[in-house]
Image: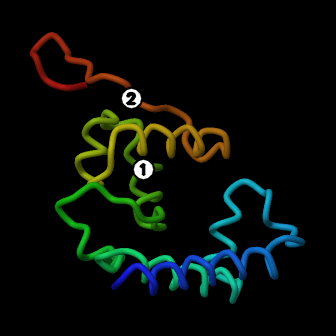
Amino acid sequence: MDRKQKKTIRLKITQLLDDHCRGCEFRSVYKSHDYCNQYCLIGKELTTCSTMLLDKPVVKKSAEENIGTMCSYRWTIEEEFYLINHASIFTINHLAKRLNRSYGAVHNKLCRLKKEKKVLFVKRKREVDAYGLPS
């Protein structure tokens, strides 16, 4: 793509923002891009224009393709169920490895579940009894 084509795309993006997004109620709201990318037709148009400016198109991977790498998708009901039932048994590190998530993501999710009173106890570190077995 040459410079003129990129310039016309940038001008189109600017025009869309000026014409349609200036008075939008979601313009200054935190995380409004989620709404704009999913529901707003102008937001979808802006996304397609911006991906045209990139040399490589952005391709989102499905949940099945993310296996083996850290997850960046929403928590499933099964994952939440697993956390609720195993938070008092296993450490956060074990849960993170099992769910293929980062330590921070599991920790934050457990904090949210605690606030919702779905999880009562979280095992921080593995305790060992007199025989060296996990208790």
Report the side of 131 relative to 7 (left or right): left
User: Residue lying furthest top in this view?
Assistant: 130
| Secondary structure of the residue carrying numbered label 1 | helix
| Secondary structure of the residue carrying numbered label 2 | loop
What x and y, as percent, mark residue 18? 79, 75
Query: Which residue is at the front of the view, 59 or 101?
Result: 59
When the figure is inspected, residue 99 is found, relative to residue 88, above or below; the finding is: below
Amino acid type, residue under disc 2 in the picture = Lys
Alpha carbon of mark 1 to alpha carbon of mark 2: how far? 11 Å
In which image quadrant can residue 13 be found? bottom right
Location of the C terminus by quadrant is top left
In which image quadrant can residue 10 be found? bottom right
What x and y, as percent, mark residue 103? 34, 38
Q: Which mark is residue 83?
A: 1
What x and y, as percent, mark residue 118? 59, 47
* Residue at horizontal 10 percent and vertical 15 percent from the top: 131
Q: How many marks are shown on the rendered structure?
A: 2
Q: Which mark is residue 123?
A: 2
Query: Which residue is at the front of the view, 4 or 62?
Result: 4
Report the side of 95 relative to 49 (left or right): left
Which numbered disc flags the more N-terminal residue, 1 or 2? 1
* Residue at horizontal 30 percent and vertical 76 percent from the top: 55
Location of the N terminus by quadrant is bottom left
User: Residue lying furthest front in this view?
Assistant: 4
Query: Which residue is at the front of the view, 32 or 121?
Result: 32
What x and y, as percent, mark residue 28? 80, 57
User: Residue lying furthest left in this view?
Assistant: 131
